[in-house]
Structure formats: structure tokens, C-alpha cells
Amino acid sequence: MNSAKDIWDRVLEMLKADLTSTAIDTWFNDCTAIDVSDNKLVLSTPTSFKKGIIESRYAPIIKSILFEIFSGDFDVVVLTDNEAEIYSRPKTENDDSIYDVFTFEHFVVGKSNNMAHAAAKAVAEGNTRQYNPLFIYGNSGLGKTHLLHAIRLRVRERHPEYNIVYVKGDDFITELIAAISTGKTLAFKEKYRHADLFLMDDVQFIAGKEQTQEEFFHTFNALYEFNKQIVFTSDRPPSEISRLEDRLKTRFESGLIVDIQPPDYETRMAIIRNKATQLGTIIEDDISDYIAKNITANVRQIEGAVKKLKAYQDLMGEKLTITDVAKILEDFYRDSIEAPTPDLIIEETAKFYNLSVDDLKGQSRTRNIANARQIAMYIIRRLTNFALVEIGDIFNGRDHSTVLSSIRKVEDSISDNKEFSQTIKDIISNINSKN
């Protein structure tokens, strides 16, 4: 069983034990494996909508199955067909061409993001060193990652000799842990401290990780002292990232902080037209208006709706009416507001406290584990429709009275402790960013 297809076929068989046939048919009937290498399985699915669902809901299950097959950690990467085509092209070392569509030209500028766009462009074109670091924050799906890669691409055009390093916050943590466990910390430090341009997406994930923050502090200082440009994105400003060390907060705040807000109606209409042009299709004004009025908070969802309508037109060859569009996007709207799964809540709560999922579901009564377990129970109760008995079952059959007691303890702490209340908000924000 060496090919990506063979591995994926095995995974699908094992998925049937955990998922309904409807879920398998809906999300994986046209999903294919295109590569397996470096402990990573790369999948391709036709639309960004399906990509998002597979990433948020099913990737953890797939990873656990891959661990069972190979007795080792495997990552899962999900690409749209367009991204898969780019991925399959011959690559050079450190090639990031999968993100080459994230250019300044493809970024739709409006009142909600014009400051962030202008700052990112100024940094990319070397017009100022005053914006160092540049810190861009806003909710998920508004274009922060797009701007980060637009900077990367523009700098690469102007300075092909530059060493450009891009990393996600949680990947930085994973790399550091691997480097420590294998005795390769020197190589890790050299990779990040010799960058000419350093870009970190979702920097909030390093908060609360003591050793990671220590290493990151020295990395930041090394880059800053040599006048290397640093750019961060986050779902909140530095002042609101709880458990982020003060010395890092002050460094993040020493440059320029800009935010991205949800797009207004005019910007949403422009995004729809822009995406339709990229896809080589035309969306009628009344349909664009319908999308813009019904999807208001997330650029990624707007683009996903346009892609889904184009796919329908290509397959069916019919002119769309508003009634058609409402029906086609019905599931899309429902899924966009669906509650996170208990597994995701437990996973993100465990990650926040540097614990494992098994710790939270296990029998340990040590204080830090018990507190994290109670918080996970509280968030599941708050964000889902699960009953107390069902929540108890998730945590290895705990009694419903135990669950209720845990939830009440968290509620009492929230009302009495502002810092603890902010911690709960941070965990929920992390969960929502992955949902």
C-alpha cells in the first residue's frame, strides 16, 4: 500500500465506521488523494466549500486513522482542484505557489480593509520601515492570510534573493517541539533567525506556551535588531491575547496595528464580481445582490458561494434564478452557522492548556487537567445542543450531575474573575476560527 490512492481507499473504508453513508457520499464522493510524502496526505476536492468542511470537521478523524495505519503522526492537507493543479506542477525548494493567487491585484479593497491593505502594500514595496512589526487582526475569513501572502509575493518579485519565511502559529509550536525532541534546535533557530522577511499567521496560538514564547522572543529580537521586516496576523489585537507575555505584547505594539472588519454591502458586491471574473463566469446583478445580502460577515464564504454557483452552471448548463440560488446555497447557509463539534471543542481546549485530548477525557484529577475538563464541558454545553447526559458520555461516561457541577463551577468563576472570563472567550475564539 504505497500510493496515495491506496492509502486514501483504506482511510475511506475506516471512515465508514465513524460516519454515516450520507456524510461519506456528501463530502468524499469526489475527493481524491494526489500525494503522500513527508508524513502528509494531500487531498483534492472540487470546491472551497467542501475543502472548508473537510478541514474543519473531518481532518482530525482522518489524522487519527492515519496514525492507526502508520503508527505515527500524519498531517492532512486539503486543496481545491485549482490549488491541486498548482500543487502538482514541478516545484522548487520552499515553493509557495499554492498561494500565488493571493496577490494585491486579487484583493478587493473597501472601507473595511483599506488601511490594512495600504499598510501591507507599503511594507511589501519597502516604502517604510516604521511599520515593523506590522500586526493585522480580524475575524476568520476576512483576508488576513491573503494580505500576508500578497506581501510575500510582492517582496519575492522585488527581491528574489531574499530568504522569506512564512509559518502558522501552531506549526511554529509543532516545529519547535519536534526540534527539541530530535536535538535539532540549532537548525530551527537558524531557519527563523536568518529570515529577511518573517511572516506568521495566527500568532495568537503561541500564547500560553511558555517555551515557545521564550524561543519566539529571541527570534523576534534577532530579526528586529537586524532591521528585518516582521508581519503578524491574529484574530484579536495584542492587548486582548490573554496569556501572551507582556514583553511580546509590547513588541507587537511597537509597530503598526491595523484591523480588518467584515465587508460592507458595496465591498461584498465587488468581491462577488471579482471572484466571478477570476473563475471566468458571470453572476447576474440580482443574484450578486442576493448573495451580498445573505452572506455578510465572511469573505471566504462569499467566494465559496460564487464557486458553488459556477459549478452548478457548469454541470447543469442552466441559467440560474433567485429560487435556484436559494436552493443551491441552502446547505451552505446552514453549514456556515453550524455549531462546532464536541471533538473540536475538546481538542482546542486541550491545546490551549498544553494537554492532550486523552488527558481531558481521562480520569486524572490533577488540578490543571480537571479545570480544563470543566471548561471543555462548559463550552460544549454553551455552543451545542448536547444534553448533560450526552456530554457525560463524551467524557468516558461521567454522570450528568458531575457535568452539571463542572459547568456551574466555570460559570461562577466567569462571574467572579475577569481574567478567567477572558480566557474562556479566547478558547471560544480559537474554536470558532477552526469551525
Image (tube, grey):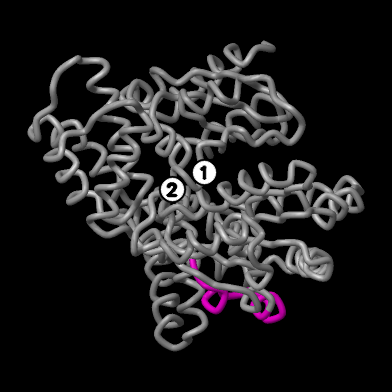
Q: Quadrant of residue 290?
A: top left
In this picture, residue 259 sits left or right of residue 261: right
Q: Position of residue 235 (x, y in %)?
A: 49, 63
Q: Do labels 2 and 1 touch, CB within 8 Å?
A: yes
Membership of 239 in magenta stretch: yes
Which residue bears the numbered disc 2? Answer: 107
Image height of 314 relative to 127, above or below: above
Residue, x 58% and y 61% (percent of image)? Answer: 122
Count the numbered circles shown.
2
Q: Residue at x 42, y 60 (%)?
A: 139
**Tag 1 residue:** 103
Residue type for callout 2: Phe
Residue 409 point in image, percent of width and height: 44, 77
* Residue range corresponding to the magenta coloring: 236-250
Q: Crowdedness of circle 2 by 10 Å Cα count: few (<14), some, many (20+)? A: some
At label 1, the amino acid type is Thr
